[in-house]
Amino acid sequence: MIGGMSWESTQLYYRLLNEGVRERLGGLRSAKVVLWSLDFGPVARFQEEGDWDGAARLLGAAARGVEAAGADFLLICANTMHRVFPDVERQVGIPLLHVADAAGEAVRAAGLRRVGLLGTRFTMEGEFYRERLAERHGLEVGIPGEADRERVHRVIYDELCVGRIRDGSRRAFAGVLGRLADAGCEGVILGCTEIPLPVAPGDSPVPLFDTTALHARAAVDRALAGERRPNGGRP
């Protein structure tokens, strides 16, 4: 795992990975994890300055460290930083699990085709995420209007990434979700690993797809492929 972007959501990943392994294998089993936790300050500066090459170098060094520590595959524990996914992938010899693939597969399994996307403005406005959902999973992806995008982005960085969850922001997210549904979205991808902190399924008139949980589940599936339950069954 490359985490720390922010650590508020990285701790969710860690909990979900361990809960997933224990649920499938039982007893005292837990996940074997290599975690490289970055200082989010420099990462956020790269984002704001548009220095994605610098971000790719930073995450690439972390990825090589995770690989050297013995990991079999890698997660980038942040949706926005999948902007540099191809660059990081080229720097290591182990597979990377893309968070948008975990989301896209879940959306298609639910029988939906048109979804909304919430995240940082880098994720909502950039092509790297929406194009992957469209090209690999056949999804139509809508994003909020400009004012809603700005509000969501601000709440992520000014509140959620520093551990604040305000009632006003909860209500704001509910309003954005409602407007996406009114625009014809059949579901909404929570494309930022912090958004599940203030948002619950009851806040939305359409199904929500929590990328933190889906990415962690995909990692558990990959890690336990071939493992057997204590009673001899498959996980």
Image: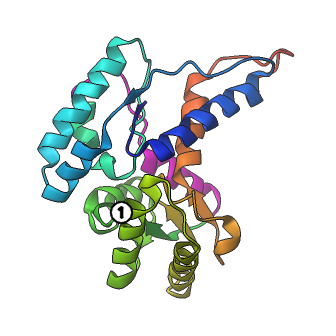
Q: Is residue 154 visible?
A: yes
Q: Is residue 99 magenta?
A: yes
For residue 41, above or below residue 89: below
Above or below 136: residue 36: above
Q: Name the image quarter holding the C terminus.
A: top right
Which residue is the site of mark 1? 120
**Quadrant of image for the N terminus:** top left
| Vertical side of 224 occupied by 187: above or below | below
User: How many labels were placed on the picture?
Assistant: 1
The front one of 145 and 158 is 158
Looking at the image, residue 175 sits to the left or right of residue 161; the answer is right
Residue pictured at 66% horizontal, 21% vertical: 30
User: Percent position (x, y) of residue 64?
Assistant: 27, 21
Left or right side of 57 for 121: right
Residue in the image at 22% along x and 43% along y? 42
| Residue drawn at 41 percent across, 42 percent down | 98
Q: Which residues are magenta?
A: 91-111
Tell which of 34 and 86 is nearer to you.
34
Q: Image height check: is 172 above or below 95?
A: below
Quadrant in the rendering for residue 97? top left
Mark 1, residues whose alpha carbon is within 10 Å: few (<14), some, or many (≥20)?
A: many
Q: Position of residue 13 (x, y in %)?
A: 54, 39
Classify residue 228 by image quadrant.
top right
Horizontal side, residue 28 vs residue 135: left or right? right
Q: Residue 77, percent across and down?
A: 42, 41
SS at mark 1 in the image: loop
Is 19 a magenta residue?
no
Please give the name of the residue rendered at 51% of the width and 46% of the height, measured from the top-left corner: 102
Q: Position of residue 22 (x, y in %)?
A: 73, 26
Residue 192 visible in the displayed image: no
Q: Amino acid at mark 1?
A: Thr
Residue closest to the eye, 89 or 44 = 44
